[in-house]
Amino acid sequence: MRSEATKGDNPTIDRRSFLGLGSAAACILSQGSLTLARAAAKAESAGAVASINSGKVRGLVDDRILAYKGIPYGASTEGARFLPPAKPQPWSGIRDAVEYGPVSPQTPSNLIPESMAQQPKADGNGTEDCLNLNLWTASLSGKRPVMVWFHGGGFSAGSGNWNMYSGRNLAAKHDVVVITVNHRLNVFGYLYLAELGGEKYAHAANVGMLDCIAALEWVRDNAAAFGGDPANVTIFGQSGGAGKVSTLMAMPAAKGLFHRAIAMSGSTVKGVPRDRATKGAEAFLAKLDLKSGQVEELARMPREQLLAGMRGVPGLQLSPVTDGRTLPADPFDPVASPISANVPFMISSTETEVTWNNSVNFDPVDDAALHERIKQSMRIDDAAADKLIGVYKKGRSQASNLDLFFIMTTDTSNFRVGTDTEAERKADQAKAAVYKYYFQWYSPVREGKLRSYHTLDIPFAFQNVQIAESMVGKGSQQQPLADKMSAAFVAFARTGNPNHKGIPKWEAFDTAKRATMIWNNESKCVNDPYREERVARKELVKTQA
């Protein structure tokens, strides 16, 4: 529930509290006085109330960790569609923060079922009252590092409510405050209208990113109320979330709101140019039988009509726009943004990113088929295809042809190219440390066919492999790797350096040695892993230029 259940500082017992106390009483009768003491302590913790700028919120106890869900960091955008976010309306009394909040309107994702199993059924199609966040902390006192997660799904889908994003285990094991954020997506967050809508919509650019900044401002103003340190904030995200992290690193309004950054399997090297974004918006309006100046009519349309209208619009790119104001320059092109020059950065990719959606064919591939697939997918001639395949076969003698195809297509996709580019340009800036990792562990689910697919490293970073068995399967390998990875993430959040006693020494990345942590059952830091493949790809790009 998200209503104001009680008023004042001495609330009456609501239905949820009554049920919790009833369960505790039954347990007391059966297990005696020791259980009585434990149940009483738990009941007191369950009523923990935090005072924030907009009012008081009461969360729940989740295995000794305080969880606060659906806290508004901004006002509803209903009636203010396409406009920058506003502060949330304050409330009186105590607001329950015990259930996930609404998510942005969106269409279904094309993720594989193993990942989609992590999406809460309650997410549904979303609403425009979606500016809310979720928070986990060990207590309301203290000064813990704060880790703020921006979810994947490109810039068009997903939410911070997914099960694998739960911050409970990170907060419990590593004593950090974890926050996940919901914000506007697709046309609601990234339709560029600044040059079409007149004075009212002159600032209708990158409002989904402005939502993210509003969430970080909320963290700055309220983290201390949850035992967090607003002077030690790490932003992290995967896929589209990594793109959001990359974009925030180049936004003036975000400067100083975070102090470390982690981008997993995603990047935003360049934003969409304004002219292209404007043409895309005009095409979208035309799809809905509107002229370029009819933004007010667009703002009044049912959200279902806008979602349906997104499909098949030529030139419509719903992602951050280099508008010259909110995003004054491309985040990592031609160089890394000076705005975040002093922010330590971690960036990564998985070995077979491309096995992440429902359209992938897992049938075996013979030599002739591999040659043809590589030739077509990379648009190269027969000789170039044979040469490239030869390099990969030499360096990966145990890999099947299908393994090679997935690795090669991942290596030439933006999942790898973009993350490599950002690592290189951030390292060349030489103002803050860069750490790079390559996730090589293969999931056993679906008979191992999915390999090291896009999103697979998330449960390990969050210490959530038990929650995410649909993705990582069962066995003895998962938890030790999760322990090492999550500890590295938190060490980085705490100090800007991911090293801890449970892993080999992780050297910072530079463009000479290219030190990279390879996460697997036996993790190791390697200088320039698969160098021959990288050099061959680079030469291929030169010949195609």
Image: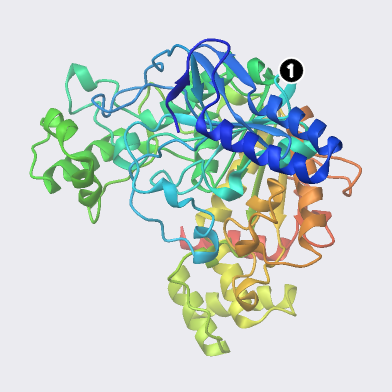
Residue located farthest toward the right when viewing the structure as drawn: 501
Query: Disc 1 marks which amino acid?
Result: Ser
One can see residue 327 in this view: no
Name the residue furthest front. 29
Q: Quadrant of residue 423?
A: top right
Query: At which x and y percent is residue 534?
Result: 65, 60
Q: Nearer the viewer, residue 50 or 259?
A: 50
Q: Quadrant of residue 366?
A: bottom right
Res. 60 in view: yes
Q: Residue at x 63, y 65 (%)?
A: 536
Residue 325 rendering spot, x and y as whole percentages: 38, 21
Q: Residue at x 51, y 41 (%)?
A: 160
Q: Position of residue 318 (x, y in %)?
A: 34, 43
Q: Nearer the viewer, residue 447 or 361?
A: 447
Above or below, 318 relative to 534: above
Which image quarter: residue 466?
Answer: bottom right
Label count reads 1
Instruction: Give the quadrant of the N terminus.
Output: top left
Choose between 441 and 368: the one closer to the eye: 441
- Write down the residue under mark 1: 141
Asked if residue 323 is positioned above or below residue 394 in the image, the reply reads above
Q: Residues within 10 Å of mark 1 (few under 14, many from 20)?
A: few
Residue 298 rendering spot, x and y as whole percentages: 16, 35
Does 314 sit above or below residue 40? below
Q: Is residue 92 left or right of residue 284?
A: right
Describe the colour scheme in one phrase: rainbow
Q: Disc 1 on helix, strand or loop?
A: loop
Q: What residue sits 76% from the left and 52% below the top? A: 482
Query: Viewed as shown, does residue 196 lie left or right of 84?
Result: left
